[in-house]
Image (cartoon, rainbow, N blue to C red):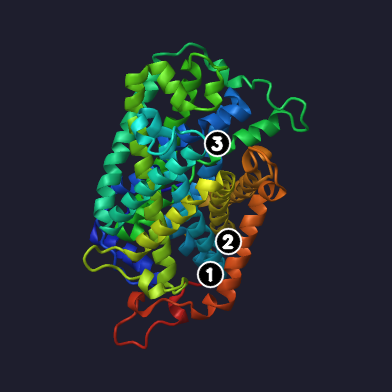
Amino acid sequence: MTDPAASRPGSGADHGHDDEAIAELGYKPELKRTLGNFHTFAAGISYISILTGTFQLFYFGIAHGGPAYWWSWPMVFLGQLMVALCFCELAARYPVAGSVYNWSKKLGGPHIGWLGGWMMLTATMVSLSAVALAYQVTLPQISSWFQFIGDGTGQSAAENAVVLGTILITFTTLVNAFGVKLMARINSAGVAIELIAAVVLILLLAAHVTRGPGVVLNTFGLGSGTNLGYFGAFLTASLASAYVMYGFDTASSLGEESKDPGRNAPRAILRALVASFLIGGLILLFALLSVPDLHSAKLSVDGLQYVVLSTLGSTVGQIVLWCVVIAITVCELAVHTAGIRLAFAMARDNNLPAASLLAKVSPRFQTPVLPAVVIGLVAIGILLLNVNQPQIFSVITSIAIIMIYLAYLAVTLPMLFQRLRGKWTPAKGRFSLGKFGIPVNILAVLWGFGMSLNLAWPRAAVYNATGPQHWYLRWGAFLFIGVVAIGGFTYYWFVQRKRTGVLAMHAAVAPDSSGPDSSNAPTP
């Protein structure tokens, strides 16, 4: 793998290459390039959000896989690394907004591109709601003042989660509407705090170690008496890691607003994924080594929040939890930002209803404002499902992660076909997998299929955790994704497909030419 420095970063040649790459896809550059190296890195790592994901899902992993579930963290990392390496080549050649949508369209054609973008956009809006619910897991543990409704049990917990989540989504909507520079400043500051807090947390937990690393071999006897034994339990528990380590493509989705993204985006993708793996893995490991009672029922209910408060005490524990709140906030901000860029990218191809409005860039804020508002409102609407139907919401949330994995497959699978046909050429002088391209790409595709199937498997523990049992909840992944994919593609085929084409205001053509046509649309 190579990433040679053919010219100085930030040089005019670099800027020209990035604009030419956008023009090759049929667009003119119109978003302001203000983001530097750390901004793009922060966008990727804040979407993954180590503290948000580990604190939100540790309880699930330990409940279903015991301490040995820790091994799912490196397993998921290696699988996602294969995907990330493929994305790095694409980010180097096509540093463009709505990266997954544009890449799948370029590699697989407009139909695959639309379906990949549609799945990713739907999943992003659901994810925005799911991340917002993390406030309820953390804020009331800091202070009962944040429990605005009831005592935090039963129905009141769901209702309060909606209130806190709505406040968070409103905040991210306003920040994103006021421009990428404000978003980047808040996001970068939040990520810096999150990274410092994560390292300090690792050191504090390491200072309270009470057992040896052999604990990660302890299965608690889970899975015994079942057909697959512990392997089946481990696959279920691995969802706690699979739900965290994605979203690194956000670093490339800001390509049209970044300085020298052809070089910086691939680095940002890898740095975000590797940093998340190392820091998150150490947090999980030292949590298992330091928790006072490894068999406490609270460990599989309250998760890392219980570990922190019981190990470090209430004062230090609350400081850590405040850092978790910051991590949740910047994670929400990054998810919202990625969704806006995706909606903008699809809209300027006239691939969404009211496309000309959604693709309009504010002359004052130099960012698409309407997608920020629309995505925020949809996310709040989805959040309201949590009030009376928390089981259905948990099903939809799980399905959203699967749809993101499938959207990634809409990139890696066509890319593999292009490689095998000898039609894929990495950007000259930029990130390249070289001779490792085909094997890495094959592993990325196999991983995508395997983990998507694992995520969708009709487990009661995931899709129908509390009674009563319903077959449509157990098979919710297949049913919901089928409806979203078939329904969405039907709409595209009979309505939107006939309108597809780069909008004149965004097309890379001279003002006095005849206007955009099919030549402006990327073709495989």
Residue farthest toward the front in the current orientation of the protein:
150
Q: Residue at horizontal 65%, vertical 59%?
A: 482
Q: Residue at horizontal 36%, vertical 61%?
A: 373
Element class at badge 3: helix
Element class at badge 2: helix
N-terminal of the two: label 2 or label 1? Answer: 2
Q: Which residue is mark 1?
A: 524
Question: Of the numbered discs in the image, which one, if any, rests on residue 240?
Answer: 3
Residue 427 shown left or right of residue 323 in the figure: right
Whole-percent x and y of residue 369? 31, 63
Distance between the alpha carbons at the discs numbered 2 and 3: 28 Å
Q: Residue 228: which quarter of the image?
A: top right
Q: Are marks 1 and 3 in contact (CB under 8 Å)?
A: no
What amino acid is found at the position of numbered circle 2 in the picture?
Answer: Pro
Distance between the alpha carbons at the discs numbered 1 and 3: 36 Å
Residue depth check, mark 2 versus mark 3: number of the one nearer the observer? 3
Whole-percent x and y of residue 100? 47, 58
Label 1 packing within 10 angstroms: few (<14), some (14-19), many (20+): some
Question: Of the numbered discs in the image, which one, if any, rests on residue 251?
Answer: none
Above or below: residue 98 compared with residue 448: below
N-terminal of the two: label 2 or label 3? Answer: 3
Q: Are marks 2 and 1 in contact (CB under 8 Å)?
A: yes
Element class at badge 1: loop
Is any part of residue 36 visible from this angle?
A: no
Is any part of residue 12 visible from this angle?
A: yes
N-terminal of the two: label 1 or label 3? Answer: 3
What amino acid is found at the position of numbered circle 1 in the picture?
Answer: Pro
Q: Which residue is mark 2?
A: 414
